[in-house]
Image (cartoon, coloured by chain):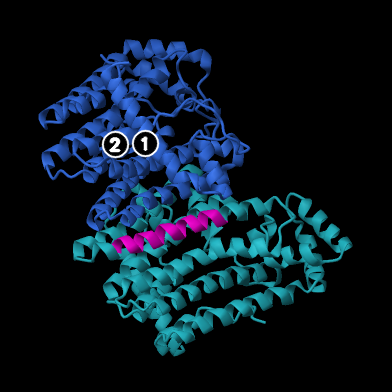
Chain colours: A blue, B cyan
Amino acid sequence: MTSAAQTIREANDAVEASLRTFMDDRELPLYKMMAYHLGWVDELGEPSHRTPQDRLRGAVAFLSSRASSGNAGSGNAVAVAIELLFNFTLIHTDIQEGNPDRMSRPALWWVWGPAQGINAGDGMHALARLVILNQADTGVDPVAISGELKILDTSALQFCEGAYMDTVFQERLAVGVEEYLSMVGSISGSLVAGAAQIGFNAGNSTDEKLAGGLTTFGRDLGVIWRLQEDHAAIWGTESMDEGAQGRLISKKKTLPVVHALETAEPSTRRELGNMYAQRVIDPANISHLREILDQSGSQEFTEQKISDHTDSAFSGLDSVGVDAEIADALKSLVGDTARG
Amino acid sequence: MTSAAQTIREANDAVEASLRTFMDDRELPLYKMMAYHLGWVDELGEPSHRTPQDRLRGAVAFLSSRASSGNAGSGNAVAVAIELLFNFTLIHTDIQEGNPDRMSRPALWWVWGPAQGINAGDGMHALARLVILNQADTGVDPVAISGELKILDTSALQFCEGAYMDTVFQERLAVGVEEYLSMVGSISGSLVAGAAQIGFNAGNSTDEKLAGGLTTFGRDLGVIWRLQEDHAAIWGTESMDEGAQGRLISKKKTLPVVHALETAEPSTRRELGNMYAQRVIDPANISHLREILDQSGSQEFTEQKISDHTDSAFSGLDSVGVDAEIADALKSLVGDTARG
């Protein structure tokens, strides 16, 4: 394991441990559903021994708090809040998109029904705030707490603004590249930008340049993750997860398709239009879809965008003097998938 | 108009005006859906001239802040927050229960679909916090802001805990009166208790007895409103709104039915069980249902519970020295419907 991977693993484990501590004393059935979603128990509430979950947004918050030279304690709290916020959005998104699976087992709403799924998400949304508010009991400055909550709620609201467009775009063919990328910034950039910003806030630094560099990094990273998913939805093979496959089949827009719809020859655009006018995309058409996207240069375009955002993310970190160990760890979150 | 009704009307109008001011500069489509739900525009975003909406939970917060001798400004903010929190729960509940209508027109999710309905509710949930956090810009003490947010999130979480049970009870016949009332306390008591408590918090008083009396009043009032709906679902006539009718038809449990299922003769219980085992209750069976509930004393029982909670609510207010004008106005919110 590289040193960067080791740092991420330690941050991830610290967030996971704090998340479990925060959730552990909640006994009502509402919280059993949440524990299931978080991968800790099975449908019957029995402990399940699953691979530790990724808590990467929490890790971004945790490491940003270290970069801001905060104490580990308040870095933990904001990281837990960000993970709860992110997981609330996953629970609701699975219902909204009709995803039956999440992490290779039935999604929460598939087990308990959509009504309880909405409810479990709403409860987790409230819990994300309470973990931050509870810091008042350990003497954290109320001004810092208010600042953290404002970051959390602003991120949540930007996510909802983006989710509105994401849903609208599913039913529309005329989606421009620019408006698509703006939507991705809202829905995918907001939570990771919020993770970096809230982590900075939990630290002691008042260096606004550092805050800006971390936040920019977070926003770019969120966009990169989404564009990597978009790329994998078309060109990924065995390793494609249910979400990516589902996105393709349910016609959720992806950057390569949006690019081709905007830029290809009229005959190609008509062909794409016919394909996307069907209720679901016939799996037999997927290889033909790939050919069209190759011809329109949409694969290179997507890879270029990922590369541009990676440059922006890295130069943001490099220019503000983030500690080298933390910077390397954060950069490793970009991964190598689909880079141009 | 009585003086109490006048005081409520003024509080209601003040909350409505603040709510509009807070929402007015939000232009994205996400907020158009919210404006529709709040009764201000039609499906196309054009202004609609509807009867002013009731903002009664906001009015409870507003008047509680006056009782705590707060300034009108911060009473407005917490009242707006409570209304946004309450309306977020309505938006989601309509999806969860499949209610097509709300206030005599299509529910938000019926117009924009369930995915956008979930999304609009989530956004409103985040906005409820932002209106409180924004008070920092006008110099409100961060400690007071944290306290208000904690009340808001605790209320939201209790609501979700209750909503879990409410949904579970729909599929279950063996629901005891005690667990039903406990659920009603969570789902219906929590938000109105939170309204009273957050209003008190926005004022200047530090009198804990006053805080306790207002909060108890709020919790009782929320329970009373729900039990009055339960009563109207069975014995209401023309004035029954869609929600109440839908609750009956969709087999959502009500106190009279729970009481009869727990206490009636075995043959009557079997008959009720058969009625509730059908997917929907045949409207033709409703008058027979009424007869059964009359025989089992369930109407009196329900009215007695409403009366008990009214006594508790009023004596709570009377014992802590709430200003007479405010106390009369708050008491008038109980109304006369279905009192024993």
| Residue type at numbered disc 2 | Phe
Labels 1 and 2 touching (C-beta < 8 A): yes
Residue linked to disc 2: A62
Image location of residue B246, percent across then percent down: 64, 59
Question: Is the residue marked by circle 1 packed among few (<14), some (14-19), or many (20+) residues within 10 Å?
Answer: many
A224 vs B336, left or right, is left
| Residue type at numbered disc 1 | Val
What is the quadrant of residue A253 in the picture? top left
Q: Is residue A31 magenta?
A: no
Q: Is residue B156 magenta?
A: yes
What is the quadrant of residue B294 in the picture? bottom right
> Which is more N-terminal, label 2 or label 1?
1
Q: Quadrant of the C terminus of chain A?
A: top left
Q: Quadrant of the N terminus of chain A?
A: top left
Residue A171 can be seen in this image: yes
Image location of residue B101, percent across then percent down: 55, 57
Q: Which region of the structure is painted magenta?
A: B145-162
Question: Is the residue marked by circle 2 packed among few (<14), some (14-19), or many (20+) residues within 10 Å?
Answer: many
Image location of residue A298, percent across then percent down: 31, 17
| Subunit bearing disc 1 | A
Nearest the viewer among B196 and B28 is: B196
Identify the element where label 1 is drawn.
helix
A22 vs B141, left or right, is right
| Subunit bearing disc 2 | A
Nearest the viewer among A199 and B195 is: A199
Residue linked to disc 1: A15
Q: Say which residue appears at 37% left-offset and 16% top-offset.
A: A267
Q: Say which residue appears at 51% left-offset and 49% top-offset.
A: A26
